[in-house]
Image (cartoon, rainbow, N blue to C red):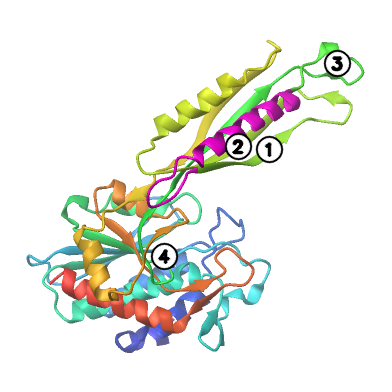
Amino acid sequence: MTASLVRAYDMTVLDLLDVLVRIDSVNPGLDPGGPGEGDIAEFVARWGSSVGLRAQVVETTPGRPSVLLRGGRDAGGRRLLLCGHLDTVGLAGNADAVTPRIDGDRLYARGAYDMKAGLAAALVACRDACAAGVDGEVIVAAVADEELASLGIQEVLAHLDAGSIDGAVVTEPTERQIGTAHRGFVWSEVTVTGVAAHGSRPHLGADAILAAGHLLVAFDEFDQQLRKRPHPFLGPGNLHASLISGGTEESTIPDRCVFTVERRTLPGETLDSVEADVADVLESCRPADPRITVEARTALHRPPMQTPLSAPIAQALLAAAGPDTVLAPMSYWADSAFISAAGIPTVLYGPEGDGAHADVEWVSMSGTCTAAAVLTRVAREFCS
């Protein structure tokens, strides 16, 4: 890493991407053997300092550091936040997944697409815009834990004055489309409790798994209703049953079944409204046997996001990317929702590629270069 830092001012976005993907930053919450963000956060902070940016390491959760880099005169111009995450999912059993391989325009490596190319583009844009002497301030938030619980962005936002930031770009891979909206999600865990008994004496038991089956059918019917109520930009919300467990052995009537339903939510839908929907579904399919009880709890909630195209940051990105750039809803959830919820107008923009969370992952090198150039133009114009 030291050799790379010596030439930090001269590093292209592809040079920086090469260094970043070689640093194993698998999220330890997803893989207990994952090293986490320590090494990559150290590199980003040292690199930022070496090119004249003000570096701050945020480590509210021990061992899970994020980095804030700041540059620009901060003398009356706008403030722009560029955000990317440091962590990746697991290596899919491939120890060589952090060694980049190039084939034509494609760079293959774990995290190349999701999302170290976007992070590299943000870092270069911050360096180059600030070297040009922007009047405002460009901030890069390189955050931990996006792939699991988003600890990093929540901790970083606590160190920022959100009210003073005029716009944000989250540099997730968007195929160089401008993302102005994405769904949120709610995980609802439903516990069905019955009465255990020997399978030969069914009158003594109350089958929790069969009762859960009726509830799952009711959730499936509700999913069909959701698909008939599309959002004008994002399309319909939806739900699916993602986890289920229950029973102890083949000849025992099960006294417990637990399943999780994930609901993908639309702008305007709140946690309260989703919890009310879940309660209505459960009430509509109340078990006939009074010995069976049903309880639901929210395991995790992440809000949806929508930024109007009229927002200055959306207009600035559209102008920098060119009139042929497509405005598109994003299929995935991202840390952009937290930034938007903090009151910062937020959009998404990053390079093209494929293989997020898959065994084979690649990013376009030309697309990465273009994304870095576009973000640099945005930073220079938006913060002037």
Say which residue appears at 12% left-offset and 67% top-offset: 74
Count residues near mark 1 (Cα–Cα under 10 Å), then give few for <14, some for 14-19, many for 20+: some
C-alpha span from label 4 to label 1: 31 Å
On the picture, is 34 further left or further right than 117?
A: right
For marks 3 and 1, the one nearer the N-term is 3
The disc labelled 4 sits on which kind of residue? Glu
For marks 2 and 1, the one nearer the N-term is 1
The residue that disc 3 covers is 202
The residue that disc 4 covers is 172
Could you tell me which secondary element the residue under label 2 belongs to? strand
Asked if disc 2 and disc 4 are in contact, CB closer than 8 Å, the reply is no
Count residues near mark 2 (Cα–Cα under 10 Å), then give few for <14, some for 14-19, many for 20+: many
Whether residue 53 is visible here, answered yes or no, is: no
2 relative to 273, above or below: below
The quarter holding residue 166 reads bottom left
Say which residue appears at 45% left-offset and 53% top-offset: 333
On the picture, is 136 further left or further right than 276?
A: left
The residue that disc 1 covers is 244
**Most distant residue in the left direction:** 76
Could you tell me which secondary element the residue under label 4 belongs to? loop
Could you tell me which secondary element the residue under label 3 belongs to? helix
The disc labelled 3 sits on which kind of residue? Pro
Q: Which residues are magenta?
A: 208-237
